[in-house]
Amino acid sequence: MSGHRIVPFLTFAGTAEEAMHFYVSIFPNSSVTSLTKVDEDEHGEGGRVVNEQFVLNGQDFMAMDMEEDFLPDMTWAVSLYVDCEDEASFDNYFDSLSVDGVVMMGPEAVGELRAVAWVTDQFGVTWQLVWK
């Protein structure tokens, strides 16, 4: 089974490139790997992202824009879990991801965990932040 990877794939309504650059700016060891857009002459809105690949702290991601008529709803039933190494990184991720987003929980201590927060960011992606 080696060689098989699981890569989160995010779908946006015209904000895929903006979201990717936002995430890459927040997380260390992150970069844009590739970006392909629809040309003005092609079917669809010119400039819309067909495929983008990026890395967030060593984890591969993919994303695209989709026409709103076909766009599925994002839901917090699926979230991105971030295991924070210290209070400074937890605070940075929380402060950055909560701007123009929705704080669903926390930050607060839960059991033996020093801080936990659930945040749906400005692009509709839900994050679980945990500092042990």
Image (cartoon, grey):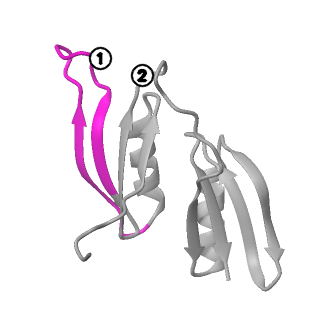
Q: Marks 2 and 1: in contact by CB < 8 Å?
A: yes
Work out which quarter of the rendered image holds the N terminus and state it. bottom left
Residue at image position (59%, 56%) is 79
Q: CA distance from mark 1 to mark 2?
A: 8 Å
Q: Mark 2 highlights which residue?
A: 67
Question: Is 32 rendered above or below residue 13?
Answer: below
Quarter of the image holding residue 10?
top left
What span is in magenta? 28-54
Place of residue 72 in the rendered image (x, y in percent of width and height, measured from the top left): 52, 32
For badge 2, the amino acid type reads Glu
Q: Is residue 126 left or right of residue 54?
A: right
Place of residue 73 in the rendered image (x, y in percent of width and height, measured from the top left): 58, 34
| Residue 35 covered by magenta stretch | yes
Work out which quarter of the rendered image holds the C terminus and state it. bottom right
Residue at image position (79%, 58%) is 105
Place of residue 112 in the rendered image (x, y in percent of width and height, measured from the top left): 78, 86
Residue at image position (29%, 51%) is 53
Q: Secondary structure at mark 1?
A: loop
Quarter of the image holding residue 113?
bottom right
**Number of numbered labels in the structure image:** 2
Q: Is residue 17 left or right of residue 126?
A: left
Q: Mark 1 highlights which residue?
A: 44
Question: Is 97 rendered above or below residue 57?
Answer: above
Residue at image position (68%, 53%) is 119
Question: Neighbour class for label 1 at 10 Å: few (<14), some, many (≥20)?
Answer: few
